[in-house]
Amino acid sequence: WNNFYRVVSPAPGKSNPPLGWEYPYYVLIEATGAEQEMDAARFERVLAASFNQGMIADAVVAKSRTERDELWAIRENVEVLPSLEPLFAFDVSLAIGDMEDYIKELCQKLSSRWPDFRYFVMGHLGDGNIHIFISIGSDDPAERCAIEEIVYSSLASRGGSISAEHGIGLQKRDYLHCCRSKSEIELMHALKQTLDPKWILNPGKVLAQ
């Protein structure tokens, strides 16, 4: 998302970013193959076709390992985010086609309660995983609960999940109903009871007695 790219990339005019700050979304694509020249030609043909179809507005192609690493360094520059704390981080998943509307709805709900809130979005489009960082200027636990309710409840109608790659654990356990039906949770309990009747394996995580 544009707001994440602005935070993690150099400012224009200082140490210019590979692409300007004017685009709504930035996608980092890495392709691998056995025939470097042929694969590079195929990749550039795909980019050209995407330009012609209006799917992309601009692109930068790494011509060396160093340039490749520099592009990835921007994407991985998440260590700048702690400087913006307090931040609440979320790891959710949903269909790619639903992501834009989901974030719009999320922002509308958050801004109605915290007009000065800030947010940053990045993720892994290939598996429908997005990370959302939200700041309201406070780390009050009650405020966190209110934000969690907004983030997770907005997923339910889109068939999304409250977790993408970091599991449920303790923190998300109370919101499991947002992405799993009552019968699914009952089945999980039945399996847990069958395989771990004394509830001694990783107790209290996801399911509680």
Image: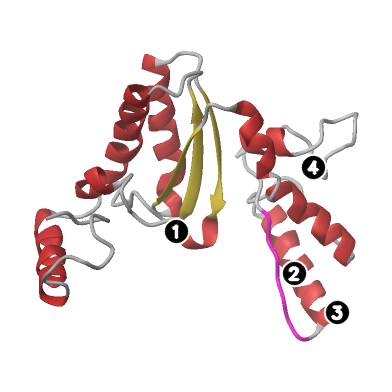
Q: CA distance from mark 3 to mark 4?
A: 25 Å
- Callout 3 amino acid: Glu
Task: Say which mark, if any, is on residue 202.
Answer: none
Q: CA distance from mark 2 to mark 4?
A: 19 Å
Label 1 or label 2, whichever comes before in sequence order: 2
Q: Nearer the observer, disc 1 or disc 2?
A: 1
The answer to which of 106 and 136 lies nearer the viewer is 136
Query: Residue 151, how many percent across, how many down?
Result: 36, 36
Secondary structure beneath dot 4 equals: loop
Q: Which residue is mark 2?
A: 43
Q: Which residue is mark 1?
A: 165
Q: Is residue 206 magenta?
A: no
Q: CA distance from mark 1 to mark 4?
A: 29 Å
Secondary structure beneath dot 3 equals: helix
Q: Quadrant of residue 4?
A: top right
Secondary structure beneath dot 1 equals: loop
- Callout 2 amino acid: Phe
Instruction: Count residues near mark 1 (Cα–Cα under 10 Å), then give few for <14, some for 14-19, many for 20+.
Output: few
Please identify the quadrant where the N terminus is shown.
top right
Q: Which residue is mark 3?
A: 37
Label 2 or label 4, whichever comes before in sequence order: 4
In this picture the colour scheme is secondary structure
- Callout 4 amino acid: Leu
Instruction: Give the residue drawn at x 83%, y 40%.
Output: 17
- Callout 1 amino acid: Glu
Label 1 or label 4, whichever comes before in sequence order: 4
Task: Say which mark, if any, is on residue 19.
Answer: 4
Q: Which residues are magenta?
A: 28-34
Query: Residue 12, how many percent across, how many down?
Result: 85, 31
